[in-house]
Amino acid sequence: MGRHPRGDRGDDPARGNGRRVERVDVFAGDSHERAGVAQVAAQLIAEHGIGDWSLAKRKAARQLGLPERAALPGDDEVEAALLDYHAIFGGEAHREMLREKREEALLWMRRLADFRPVLVGGVAGGWATEHSDVRIDLVTDDGKAVELLLINQGCEYRHAPSRHADDPMELWIDTRSTGVRLRVRTHRDARQVPRRNRHGQASLRLDAAAVAALLDADAEAS
């Protein structure tokens, strides 16, 4: 008797022979690995101040013994892992640090009110570490106007290096407690900034009133 073709074997799950066949989700392993990498990367970022998140992810993958081509988490997954890290290990020290950075942000947002400032990044989202800077987006078609205001206020600043010629202008200010990074966009460029992340969630962009409300809520909870 000839051999049956592979697809015609009697234990084929397509045949109703009463056996239950477990299907393997090929994406489940990737999802678990990504979560593990995100958690370790978050720890490296929080504890060692690694600012290059791509580097932190690669280091995390190596620590976990994953292959070089393993699927790495997105930045949003690392942000979520940082929130978890702070919830477990941060305590009052993290809350106080975040409060100080938000107070610093509000101070500069009020100074720069003419340029539609919004707070973004870790200080806005709550996942900031002690190494994180305060990131504020500004909108104006005349970037020199921002520099002139800073000069008139006696504020020392420097231009942050850009990777591409068409990147928005960024100014860096050193303060006693942290660093403040101002990203200056034209009105046209500001309209093109994505309002949602890759999961369709609204990107967090807080105006001065929203930052003040967070600080008031934190004070009431203390």
Image: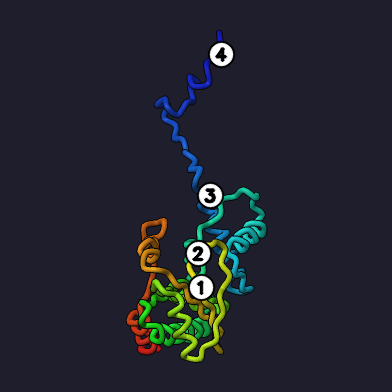
- In the rendered image, which quarter is residue 214 located in? bottom left
Q: Earlier in the sequence, mark 4 or mark 3?
A: 4
Tell me the CA gap for discs 2 and 1: 9 Å
Q: Earlier in the sequence, mark 4 or mark 1?
A: 4
SS state under label 2: loop
Q: Is residue 37 left or right of residue 213?
A: right
- Residues marked 4 and 2 touching at CB (< 8 Å): no
- Classed neighbour count for the residue bearing mark 4: other residues with Cα under 10 Å, few (<14), some (14–19), many (≥20): few
**At 56% across and 13% down in the image, what residue appears?**
3
Residue 30's tag is: 3
- In the rendered image, which quarter is residue 195 located in? bottom left
Tell me the CA gap for discs 4 and 3: 37 Å
Return the x and y of residue 57 as percentages of the image width and height. 60, 60
Q: Earlier in the sequence, mark 4 or mark 2?
A: 4
SS state under label 3: helix
Amino acid carrying mark 1 in the image: Glu
Q: Earlier in the sequence, mark 3 or mark 1?
A: 3
Reading the image, the residue beneath label 4 is 3
Reading the image, the residue beneath label 1 is 170
Residue 167's tag is: 2
